[in-house]
């Protein structure tokens, strides 16, 4: 979809428009909002991921409270921790 890491982590559940197959990216480069196409495969993965935490607001909630606390998280995942995980192959 061409999102920057910070844009992806900041996604909110309400930003996903499954009917129109697009996502609303807020405060992207130049502090502008934009809408990007949402492939069906990505939507499917996002839906499956959301069922693991069911946070009503954030698509990628932090896990400071552990896996059981992510449904109540108020901040997104930390990008530094995510980058380390991706670099380690985990």
Image (cartoon, grey):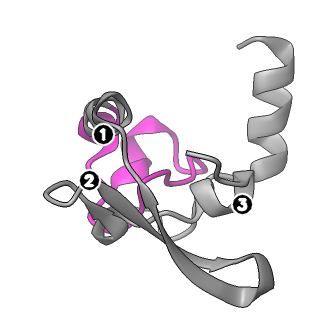
Residue 65 forms part of the magenta stretch:
yes
x, y percentage for residue 58?
Answer: 42, 62
Query: Nearest the camera: 5 or 85?
Result: 5
Left or right side of 75 for 12: left
**Secondary element type, mark 3:** helix
Q: Is residue 74 left or right of residue 32?
A: left
Between 4 and 65, the one nearer to me in the picture: 4
Circle 2 residues within 10 Å: few <14, some 14–19, many ≥20: some
Q: Position of residue 24 (x, y in %)?
A: 43, 71
Residues at marks 1 and 2, CA–CA distance in whole angstroms: 8 Å
Asked which quadrant contains residue 7, the reply is bottom right
Marks 3 and 2, how far apart at CA: 21 Å
Residue extending furthest toward the top: 89
Observer-side mark, 3 or 2, equals: 2
> Is residue 74 depicted above or below 23 in this figure?
below
Check disc 2 and report the residue beneath it.
21
Q: Which residue is mark 1?
A: 43
Q: Residue 54 colored magenta?
A: yes
Counting from the top left corner in percent of width and height, residue 82 is at: 74, 38
Q: Residue at x 26, y 49 (%)?
A: 54
Q: Residues within 10 Å of mark 1 (few under 14, many from 20)?
A: some
Q: Are marks 1 and 2 in contact (CB under 8 Å)?
A: yes
**In the image, residue 40 lies at what x, y percent?**
28, 34
Q: Which residue is mark 3?
A: 6
Range covered by the magenta-colored residues: 49-71
Q: Earlier in the sequence, mark 1 or mark 2?
A: 2
Q: From the viewer's perspective, is residue 75 above or below residue 27?
A: above
Q: Secondary structure at mark 1?
A: helix
Q: Does residue 14 lie above or below 59 as drawn?
A: below
């Amino acid at each position: 979809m061409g999102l920057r890491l910070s844009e992806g982590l900041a996604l909110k559940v309400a930003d996903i428009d499954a009917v129109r197959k697009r996502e609303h990216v807020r405060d992207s480069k130049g502090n502008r909002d934009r809408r990007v196409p949402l492939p069906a495969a990505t939507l499917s993965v996002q839906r499956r991921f959301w069922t693991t935490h069911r946070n009503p607001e954030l698509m990628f909630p932090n896990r400071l409270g552990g896996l059981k606390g992510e449904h109540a998280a108020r901040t997104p995942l930390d990008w530094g921790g995510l980058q380390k995980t991706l670099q380690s192959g985990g």
